[in-house]
Image (spheres, rainbow, N blue to C red):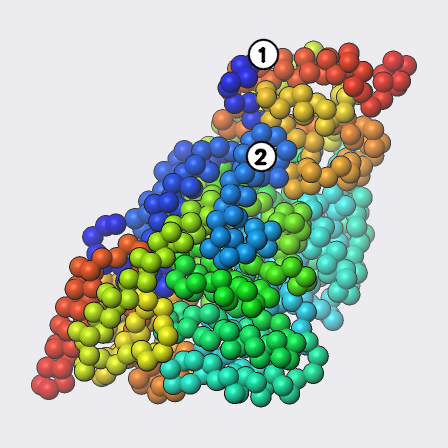
Amino acid sequence: MRDGFYLDNNATTPLRPEAKGAMLCAMDAPGNPSSVHGFGQAQRRIVEDAREHVAALAACAPANVIFTSGGSEANNTLLHGIAANNIVTTSVEHASVLDAVPNAMIVPVDADGVIDLNALREVVSGLDGRTLLSVMAANNETGVIQPIQAVAEIVREFDAKLHVDAIQAAGKIDLAPIVRVSDAISLSAHKLGGPQGIGAIIVRDGVPFEPLVKGGGQERRRRAGTENVIGIAGFGGAAEAALAEFDDFQALADMRDGIEIALAGDAVFYGQGVSRLANTSCIGMRGVSAETQVMAFDLAGIAISAGSACSSGKVEPSHVLRAMGLSDEDAGQTIRMSLGWANDPSDVGAFIDAWRALRARTASEVAA
Amino acid sequence: MTNTEARPIYLDYQATTPVDERVMDAMTPFFTQAFGNPHSTSHSYGWEARDAVEVARQQIATMINADPREVIFTSGATESNNMAIKGVGRFFAGRKNHMVALKTEHKCVLESIKYMQRHEIDVTWLDVNADGLVDPDTVAAAIKPDTALVSVMLVNNEIGVIQPLAEIGAICRDRNVYLHTDAAQATGKIVIDVQAMNIDLMSLSGHKMYGPMGIGALYVRRKPRVRFEPLMDGGGQERTMRSGTLPAPLVVGFGKAAEIISQDLDQEAARIRNLRDRLLKGLQQRIADTFVNGSQNQRVMGNINIGFRGVDSESLMNALKDYVAISSGSACTSTSVEPSYVLRAIGLSDLDAHSSVRMCVGRMTTAQEIDQAIAAISNAVEKLRGAGLVTNAASVAG
């Protein structure tokens, strides 16, 4: 790492050394994995090794892993590709879900950002035909974990299909129970220490879908295009490392909780009372706009964000926080701090100092 | 003959190219130090990645004489082709329900158009002549009042022939029809000028031009503006035309690869053409009963598609596997036993198509490798013919 404190790991993560190593090996040789000559076969082995590591992370068979260009493609493929008369999703999903299905029925969340199961049951029970439900495993802005098992029971009861956007959850919570009850899952490498530009879908046997990208017969005809071998290798390396270091990730909760204890009383924490990812804290500073906070942190050499990276150019308040019942004003004064594999306790200390300094400065400005 | 301990000579540059060292050097820091999400606007990690993406966008634009705002990054040419064809088809659905394409297009163009065909788009499939080229008049004749899109590949992936795109572009502009071209096989081999050729949509690929796999682009003309529906919705990246986090390191590598092409193409083309001619002449001198597929004049500099009568291409590739890496056609269909539809379209019999192989010389190929390859290929052909491991022994004997 270089100078500065990177605390925006839900936007993207630094590349894990294991991922880098696997990518360097893959870069070493030319070859298209579909070519039958030796160069091609060597590339094919790299792809299949990586597929095994991703399958291990997701506790599924390698044959159920299909590589895509990332999480957005994964979500678009499944939501457009699985035949359904009705699509149901929640108000806190990522934009790549909400924008892919503009006509979906939206189930609300409670003040902590957890899906309202009664509302879900009511919506699903009233539908005719095939229903596809899309629920994220963990939220990118708050880290709040959805009760997928309870959701799956409703899905089973009404014979619907379940898609789980596990992009923020992979490597951070145990995917096995989620994969067991889902029909399809979306994953992204660069949120778990792999490179950008590579993701995957995991599709249960017997769940048909229309591929989004058509052409050559790659990925068993389910996703055309020459495989991004370097990216796939990096995804495999990152998945392997994320699985091996799963406990280390859970230990990030100590650092995160350290921040929340240090700032308790002054700050507001959203989603704090429910099950959350170990690395995420969604923090409001009353009276100070998120933009001001982000700039002040940047001057202190600390990278955080005011919400999701893909929409961080927009000035609108977060749809996630609005769905949790926050006013525009409160939502507009909230930032996201997300830790990752490369952080250490000194990063947390720097964050606390910067937060307090800004609080003190703005409080005195208000007083004056 | 080459030492079997050494790696085979790589003559499959149309399947994929090695990453250029200069590209690698440009990419590396963006994997590890400047790893930010280019869409993060709140910190310098994000800004740094975004600035690098914009430099790359300019580098791609320069290579094709476009405005940087017309360059949309994708995961590769397959995605770009899907995006252009399905996107235009969906945008004009109900108003313009007709498309025109060559029978020899890349598989992903064929599949995307066939998909639209299943969704009420009428398609005119154009034949090519024995040289593999389409007559611009044939294109003009195929355009109807409700034609939304003409898709003609710039360079064929199997036989390397260059279509008369400037003429076709003039016709399409005149008739107010979008021209899409799959230029994945053209970049780094010929000069591409989207203005001179009147191209409206163009698919590009990183890994066919010494950049990395997993990155490509779609050129989308701004004036007159091209309208299409995005393939992927989401965070609204790439001016809402292509959502998804951009892989900044791959984009940087792609841009660098384009910059190298903009600077070195003339020199490189001459060098590669010399090597290709040396290879072709060498094979023709050493081996009897050969035939070349596709136009010899309207052809990119590295490509050879050659048939050895009486020699099955699968057996030849197998005999050469420790010495020379070549292919029998497109990599994406190389596990298929069907004869190449491109070779069939230029009039080859199944037998001749099965006796043909594709070779492509590239940036890293040396004269010594060419000479070694000639020796290895002619030995293998001789042995296969001698051993009677032939598909048409009778016709050769006769």
Q: Residue B248: in sight, yes or no?
A: no
Viewed as shown, does residue B390 lie left or right of B228?
right
Q: Are marks 1 and 2 in contact (CB under 8 Å)?
A: no
**Among the 4 quarters of the image, the one containing residue B372:** top right
Marking on residue A40: 2
Q: Nearer the viewer, residue A203 or B76?
A: A203
- Classify A40 as above or below A253: above
Marking on residue B1: 1
Indicate the secondary structure of the residue bearing disc 1: loop
| Quarter of the image with the C terminus of chain B in it | top right
Chain under callout 1: B
Viewed as shown, does residue A53 lie left or right of A316?
right
- Classify B321 as above or below A247: above
- Classify A215 as above or below B19: below
How many numbered circles does the render carry? 2
Across and down, in percent, residue A235 comes to: 45, 50
Amino acid type of the residue tagged 2 in the rendering: Gly
Indicate the secondary structure of the residue bearing disc 2: helix
Residue count near mark 1 (Cα–Cα under 10 Å), binned few <14, some 14–19, many ≥20: few
Chain under callout 2: A
Q: Nearer the viewer, residue B223 or B384?
A: B384
Viewed as shown, does residue A244 lie left or right of B279?
left
